Image: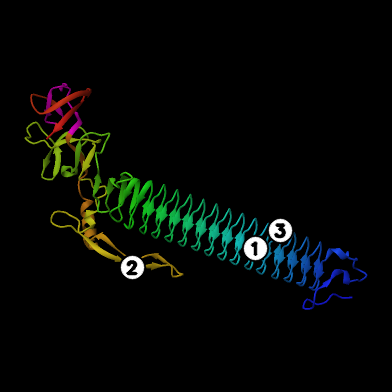
Amino acid sequence: MLPKSANEDCFDKKAVQTAETLEVEDDCNTSVCGRCSSADGCNTSSSGECSHAEGCGSKALGDCSHAEGSNTRALENNSHAEGCSTRAIGNCSHAEGSNTIAYSDSSHTEGLNTKTRGNYAHGEGNGNEANGESSHAQGVGTKAEGYASSSEGGYTTVRGSYAHAEGYSTTVNGYYSHAEGVYTTATGNYSHAEGYSCLTEGYGSHAEGYYTSARAPFSHSEGYYTDTKLNTGSHIMGIYGEADTPYSWFLGGGTSNLKALAAKILYTGDGYIRNAWHAGGSGYAEVYPGLGGQTIEPGYFVTLEGEFIRKAKDSDKFVLGVTSVNPAFVASSSELNLGSNFLTNAWNQTLYEDNLVPEKTDTEGNVTEPAHVIKQPMQKLQSSVIAQAAASCQDSISSLVTLLGQVLVLDDGTCEPNGYCWPNKDGIATTSSFGYRVMKRISDNQVLIFFRG
């Protein structure tokens, strides 16, 4: 006798008797409905075509499905449920472990009390949910709700697409964002929060450390209780501090009762410090170009010829300073000076203007950069910049000149500590009854003096 087709009532295996079948015990209570299906164990049933149920109380309801273990259900076609009280509900889904449910197509859940509600998702561990399409949740009590998102650790939640949460009780709300550590939250798109109770709200922002917040786009907060506030592109570190200007750097130095800054450098090039700079070098120096393009070695007294310097002579009434290499402070430096590219007023002050940066989106329409206004230096016309750059190439080589403080100077061997010196005809020190105080001899032709112009 041939088995009935899948759309007819189920029947007991013991009712099917052919030369090729074995007699089934009456107390097994297995049933087969589907064509070419089979059921083994006790209280199992196979109602889908080509399905297989085995174990205790398991049911293979979908075509080509497989249920095994205890009280498992393979409900959809091509699904597989195994373990204890698992459910494979989605097409081509797989549930294993204990009390796991694979709701969606081609999803996989394993462990204890895990669920997959997103197609092609994967959940493993204890009490985790992979709800977003192509998402992954693992650990304990984690949720991956965004498309292609990943959540791991303990009680972490990912809501943004392509995002990742790890650690303990971390949350990711933004697209393409990452939260790690403990109680951190990455809300802004493309943001990263790490550490303990850190928060990112701005696009492309980063917060790390302990109770830090990066609330503005492209901002960065680190340290201990620091906050960028709404200052776009700002960076703050240290302790108990808040940024107060966009696109600038800050060092927090406050208390739990009073937020304060110890230092800051603004995007305009201005710097501030609460107390003092400590330097290993000595003296205050400025940069001066040499007359006729000459290079003046360190240790010579120099004077001015217009805006240029030359070696001083004993007949000069004015001595500018001493060429040096290791001052504590250098002024008039062109290392970061881009003034030749920007417009200035009559006092050489850079002019600024407000420019609107339009909103930018990716190919999916997600905002990658919100519209905002930025204060920028006013640039010169390109032709003016090129002409000025060509002229600067012909400028003479510059030297550092110490104008105040301790400085090493070459001498003719006549200078003595506690005495005074003055430049000779070659620009090196020689003993004198007036001039600059000699502090000590360094070598046969070098002494340390205190220079004050």
Q: Is residue 186 above or below residue 290?
A: below
Tell me, yes or no, whether the highlighted magenta stretch contains residue 27. Answer: no
Q: Are marks 3 and 1 in contact (CB under 8 Å)?
A: no
Q: Residue 15, position in %: x, y?
A: 88, 72
For badge 2, the amino acid type reads Pro
Q: Quadrant of residue 133?
A: bottom right
Q: Tag 2 or tag 1, which sits nearer the N-term?
A: 1
Q: Residue 256, position in %: x, y?
A: 33, 45
Disc 2 versus disc 3: distance between alpha carbons? 56 Å
Say which residue appears at 61% left-offset and 54% top-offset. 126
Question: Which residue is under mark 3?
Answer: 84
Disc 3 versus disc 1: distance between alpha carbons? 11 Å
- From the image, which quarter does the N terminus lie in? bottom right
Q: Tag 1 or tag 3, which sits nearer the N-term?
A: 3
Tell me, yes or no, whether the highlighted magenta stretch contains residue 420. Answer: yes
Q: Is residue 186 above or below residue 253?
A: below
Q: Which of these two is toward me, 248 or 390? A: 248
Q: Which of these two is toward me, 139 or 280? A: 139
For label 3, count other residues whose C-alpha is less than 10 Å away and answer few (under 14), some (14-19) or many (20+).
many
Question: What residue range appears in magenta?
Answer: 405-429
For badge 1, the amino acid type reads Ile
Residue 358, which numbered label? 2
**In this image, 365 relative to 271: left or right?**
right
The secondary element bearing badge 2 is classed as loop
Q: Is residue 248 above or below residue 302?
A: below
Q: Nearer the viewer, mark 2 or mark 3?
A: 3
Question: Which residue is under mark 1?
Answer: 101
Q: Which of these two is toward me, 45 or 356? A: 45
Say which residue appears at 30% left-offset and 52% top-offset. 243
